Image (cartoon, rainbow, N blue to C red):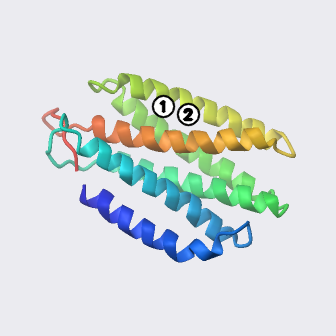
C-alpha cells in the first residue's frame, strides 16, 4: 500500500509539473512521460483497490519476477509512446526499438502469467491476460507491416496496453504467495 500511495503522489506531481508542456506532440519526452506516468498512476490506483480488498490477506511478500515484469512493461509502454510521437514526426526507426523491447516484454509477461496460472482465484484473469497479450502482439506486428498505420489500429494497440496494466496488477496482487503457499500482499 505504501508503494502504491507513494507512486500516486510522485506521478501526480510529475504530471502536474509537465502539464503546461503537453499540448500537441511538440516535445516527445513529455508525451512519453505523460503516457508512462498515466499508466503508473492507473496501476497504483488499481494496486490500492486490489490490496485494500477485505478478502486479501495482509502478509507482506516480495516478488522479483513481478517487479521486474512491471519495469519491463513500463519500458515497453514508453518505447511505444516514443514510437507513436516520433512517427508523427516521420521518424519510423524507433518502431524497431519498440519491437525489440516487445520481445523482452513478452518473455516477462508470459513468464509471470505462466508462473501464476495455477494460483487459486486468478485463472480467469490469467486467461484473459494471455488473450490480451496475444492480441497485442498481433496488432503490433500488423502495425509494423502497415504504413501508414491506421488510426484504429494504433488506438486499439494503446488501449490494450492500459487493460493489460490493470490485469497485470490484479495477477500480481491476487496471485501472490509466500514460501508456505499462503496469499499475501506488500
Up the image or down, 127 lies above or below 115; here it is above
Query: Whole-Å distance between the Cαs marked 1 and 2?
Result: 6 Å
Q: Residues within 10 Å of mark 2 (few under 14, many from 20)?
A: some
**Would residue 152 appear left or right of 79 to someone viewing this image?**
right
The residue depicted at 57 percent of the width and 63 percent of the height is: 34
Circle 1: element type: helix
Quadrant of the rendering where the N terminus is positioned: bottom left
The residue depicted at 81 percent of the width and 56 percent of the height is: 92
Q: What is the quadrant of residue 94 in the picture?
A: bottom right
Please name whichever residue, 52 or 64, is drawn nearer the observer in this view of the structure: 52
Residue, disc 1: 129
The residue depicted at 60 percent of the width and 42 percent of the height is: 159
Please name whichever residue, 76 or 108, is drawn nearer the observer in this view of the structure: 76
1 and 2 marks in contact (CB < 8 Å): yes
Circle 2: element type: helix
Residue 44 picture location, percent across and down: 37, 54
Up the image or down, 177 lies above or below 46; here it is above
Residue 70 picture location, percent across and down: 43, 50
Residue 25 picture location, percent across and down: 73, 66
Residue 90 picture location, percent across and down: 85, 61
**Would residue 136 appear left or right of 38 to someone viewing this image?**
right
Residue, disc 2: 133
Give the total number of marks visible in the rendering: 2
Q: Residues within 10 Å of mark 1 (few under 14, many from 20)?
A: many
The residue depicted at 38 percent of the width and 43 percent of the height is: 169
Marking on residue 87: none
**Would residue 35 appear left or right of 4 to someone viewing this image?**
right
Amino acid at each position: 500500500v505504501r508503494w502504491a500511495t507513494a507512486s500516486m503522489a510522485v506521478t501526480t506531481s510529475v504530471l502536474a509539473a509537465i502539464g503546461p508542456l503537453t499540448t500537441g506532440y511538440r516535445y516527445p519526452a513529455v508525451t512519453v512521460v505523460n503516457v508512462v506516468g498515466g499508466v503508473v498512476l492507473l496501476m497504483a490506483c488499481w494496486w490500492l483497490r486490489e490490496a485494500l480488498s477485505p478478502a486479501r490477506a495482509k502478509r507482506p511478500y516480495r516478488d522479483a519476477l513481478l517487479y521486474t515484469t512491471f519495469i519491463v512493461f513500463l519500458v515497453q509502454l514508453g518505447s511505444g509512446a516514443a514510437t507513436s510521437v516520433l512517427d508523427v514526426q516521420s521518424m519510423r526507426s524507433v518502431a524497431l526499438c519498440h519491437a525489440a523491447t516487445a520481445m523482452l516484454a513478452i518473455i516477462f509477461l508470459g513468464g509471470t502469467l505462466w508462473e501464476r496460472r495455477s494460483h487459486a482465484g486468478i485463472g480467469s484473469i490469467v486467461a484473459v491476460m494471455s488473450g490480451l497479450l496475444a492480441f497485442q502482439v498481433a496488432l503490433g506486428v500488423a502495425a509494423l507491416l502497415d504504413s501508414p498505420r491506421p488510426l484504429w489500429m494504433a488506438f486499439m494497440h494503446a488501449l490494450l496496453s492500459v487493460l493489460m496494466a490493470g490485469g497485470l496488477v490484479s495477477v500480481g496482487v491476487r496471485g501472490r504467495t509466500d514460501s508456505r503457499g499462503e496469499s499475501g500482499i506488500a
